[in-house]
Image (cartoon, rainbow, N blue to C red):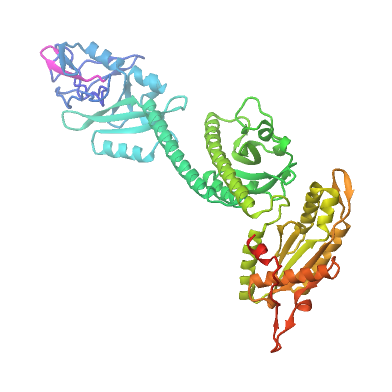
């Protein structure tokens, strides 16, 4: 008999010739467990294979037997041992770590070793007369591999493949299967020997390695997307731009999740929906900050995968896992990023689902940190910009911003041939008010007046403080008559509104105004000069009124053309233009 291992396991390739029996005489019957027997073929003994020493596989057992005189001699991994009796050969085959199956020429099982029963759960008496494939193969066994085995057997070729089998309990396991035909003296197939090595652990290791590699690749891809998002976030100049960038980016980073962005309302008493992605987007959604555990505790909160969980008040209907991540800028919480994971149940998660949620939460935390940093940057930019273009006392635009905006609107008016007017305003008797009630009361009066200016609800109307009690309004796409109507309506509101300072009700304010249209001036400097002249005319006429430059101040020249008068030496135009 010659034994040839498949990648370290023994593979029979000859027959046992018992001692004292001639090579051409019938071989002895070798008893096996379970009352069955294996009868090698009759005929001259001859080895049919070569030694496979199982290179690279630890624990391999290479067996080769030779007929030397009376008893066969056995070689274990190349080392020749003393003459080996048939009973020892049988014991070796029965106790190797690989399973051995012997079939007849039709592929029907005639013998198995103990390891086969341990591996598959089937005893020899359950396998006799049946093809191993019909018993061991299952629904996920690769049909291509099965066909490959059939072709090799049909062409009398040895084959080694990896195939998925099922044990008696229908639990799948992977094997490395080596099949070799055994020929009789006439060269016909007498039987097949199959060696099966359990490689389930190795296959599982490959799967885990691939999963790990995939996770690392996904992590790299996710971080690349986070990097791209950060680049866009730090290019934003407003909170509104940030919200748009966050929605677009998170849709790519979390394609299987839904999310919403909530920002504090101006009153800071509720969180209002500002944007989002997926099915969670709902423009009318708002809730109290203390109804969210993440906002209440000041740190990220995940609902899902834990033994003890309490749902947020704003997400009581959610059955899937979600995360609430506060957006914090310079230590101030300004909003909330809510991410829902509809494919992950909040309760009863599998181990794989819990791991997936944990990875998503780690990535979400990285994202919200970038969002918070970018938000802080935008707020700082806005604060610096506001300080440069906003009046600190009243919150209105300052003279610098007004000049830039007026220049822009004047150019647009010239291109579109649409009207534009400039209004100059001055609070009547403000010095007297200051002297009587004090400068703090005067500051309160300025704030009240500025608040009414800010309340003008008309597109293209911008109010600014020039300094002291002087204010100005740009009225884009507005005729002179419309500008006068805006100013008169403002006067009615201001004159009826009380000024409350330190719990004391002070007299209401009044103001004078001058209006000039772009038709009366070739440039902004002249236009402001004209509006200023109209303002002085209104004050000279008794205050608390509005004068229009084109109707009051314009005078004909000697040729009959209408031109604005020269600026008097006492005019404050240069002061208005350059501060």
Q: In the rendered image of this protein, does residue 540 appear above or below residue 107?
A: below
Magenta stretch: includes residue 367: no
Q: Which is nearer the eye, 30 or 265? A: 265
> Does the image show residue 136?
no
Which residue is depicted at the point 39% across and 22% down? 119
Residue 208: % across, % down: 42, 31
Residue 130: % across, % down: 37, 28
Q: In the rendered image of this protein, does residue 129 appear above or below residue 27?
A: below
Which residue reaches farthest front? 569
Q: In the rendered image of this protein, does residue 59 appear above or below residue 451?
A: above
Count numbered badges in the picture. 0
> Does the image show residue 267?
yes
Q: Relative to residue 119, is residue 380 drawn left or right?
A: right
Q: In the rendered image of this protein, does residue 224 appear above or below residue 579?
A: above
Q: Which is nearer the eye, 469 or 79? A: 469
Q: Relative to residue 230, is residue 285 drawn left or right?
A: right
Which residue is depicted at the point 46% across and 27% down? 171
Q: Which residues are magenta?
A: 60-71
Magenta stretch: includes residue 61: yes
Q: Relative to residue 366, is residue 531 drawn left or right?
A: right
Residue 112: % across, % down: 33, 21
Q: Quadrant of residue 296?
A: top right
What quarter of the picture does the N terminus occupy? Answer: top left
Residue 360: % across, % down: 54, 37
What quarter of the picture does the C terminus occupy? Answer: bottom right
Which residue reaches farthest bottom? 559
Which residue reaches farthest left? 69
Q: Which is nearer the eye, 129 or 409? A: 409
Q: Quadrant of residue 204?
A: top left
């Amino acid at each position: 008999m010659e034994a040839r291992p498949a990648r370290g396991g023994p593979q029979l390739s000859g027959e046992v010739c018992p001692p004292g029996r001639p090579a051409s005489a019938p071989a002895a019957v070798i008893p096996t467990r379970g009352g069955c027997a294996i009868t090698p073929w009759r005929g001259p003994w001859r080895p049919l294979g070569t030694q496979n020493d199982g290179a690279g596989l630890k624990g391999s057992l290479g067996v080769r037997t030779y007929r030397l005189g009376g008893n066969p001699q056995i070689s274990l991994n190349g080392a020749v041992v003393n003459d080996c009796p048939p009973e020892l050969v049988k014991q070796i085959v029965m106790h190797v770590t690989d399973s051995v199956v012997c079939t007849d020429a039709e592929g029907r099982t005639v013998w198995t070793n103990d390891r086969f029963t341990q591996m598959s759960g089937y005893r020899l008496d359950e396998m006799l007369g049946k093809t191993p494939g019909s018993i061991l193969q299952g629904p996920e066994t690769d049909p291509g591999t099965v066909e490959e085995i059939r072709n090799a057997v049909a062409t009398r070729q040895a084959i080694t493949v990896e195939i998925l089998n099922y044990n008696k309990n229908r639990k799948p396991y992977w094997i490395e299967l080596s099949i070799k035909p055994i020929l009789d003296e006439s060269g016909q197939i007498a039987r097949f020997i199959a060696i099966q090595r359990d490689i389930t652990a190795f296959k599982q290791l490959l799967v885990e390695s691939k999963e790990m590699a995939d996770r690392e690749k996904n992590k790299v891809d996710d971080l690349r997307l986070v990097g791209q998002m950060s680049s866009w976030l730090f290019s934003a100049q407003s909170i509104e731009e940030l919200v748009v960038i966050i929605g677009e980016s998170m849709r790519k980073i979390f394609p299987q999740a839904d999310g919403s962005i909530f920002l504090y309302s101006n009153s800071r008493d509720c969180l209002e929906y500002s944007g989002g992605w997926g099915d969670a987007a709902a423009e009318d959604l708002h809730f109290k900050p203390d109804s969210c555990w993440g906002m209440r505790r000041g740190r990220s909160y995940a609902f899902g995968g834990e033994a003890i969980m309490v749902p947020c008040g704003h997400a009581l209907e959610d059955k899937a896992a979600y995360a609430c991540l506060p957006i914090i800028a310079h230590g101030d919480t300004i909003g909330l990023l809510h991410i829902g994971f509809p494919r992950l149940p909040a309760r009863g998660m599998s181990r794989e689902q819990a791991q997936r949620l944990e990875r998503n939460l780690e990535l979400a935390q990285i994202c919200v940190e970038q969002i918070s940093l970018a938000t802080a940057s935008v707020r700082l930019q806005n604060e610096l910009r506001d300080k440069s273009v906003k009046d600190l006392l009243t919150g209105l635009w300052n003279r610098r911003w007004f000049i830039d905006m007026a220049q822009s609107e004047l150019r647009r008016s010239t291109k579109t041939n649409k009207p534009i007017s400039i209004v100059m305003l001055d609070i009547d008797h403000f010095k007297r008010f200051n002297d009587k009630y004090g400068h703090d009361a005067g500051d309160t009066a300025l704030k009240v007046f500025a608040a009414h200016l800010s309340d003008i609800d008309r597109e293209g109307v911008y109010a600014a403080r020039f300094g002291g009690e002087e204010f100005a309004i740009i009225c884009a796409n507005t005729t002179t008559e419309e500008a006068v109507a805006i100013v008169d309506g403002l006067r009615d509101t201001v004159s009826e509104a009380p000024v409350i300072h330190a719990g004391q009700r002070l007299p209401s304010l009044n103001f004078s105004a001058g209006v000039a249209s772009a038709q009366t001036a070739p440039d902004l400097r002249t236009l402001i000069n004209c509006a200023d002249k109209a303002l002085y005319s209104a004050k000279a006429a008794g205050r608390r009124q509005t004068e229009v430059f084109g109707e009051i101040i314009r005078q004909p020249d000697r040729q009959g053309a209408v031109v604005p008068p020269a600026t008097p030496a006492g005019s404050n135009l240069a002061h208005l233009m350059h501060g």
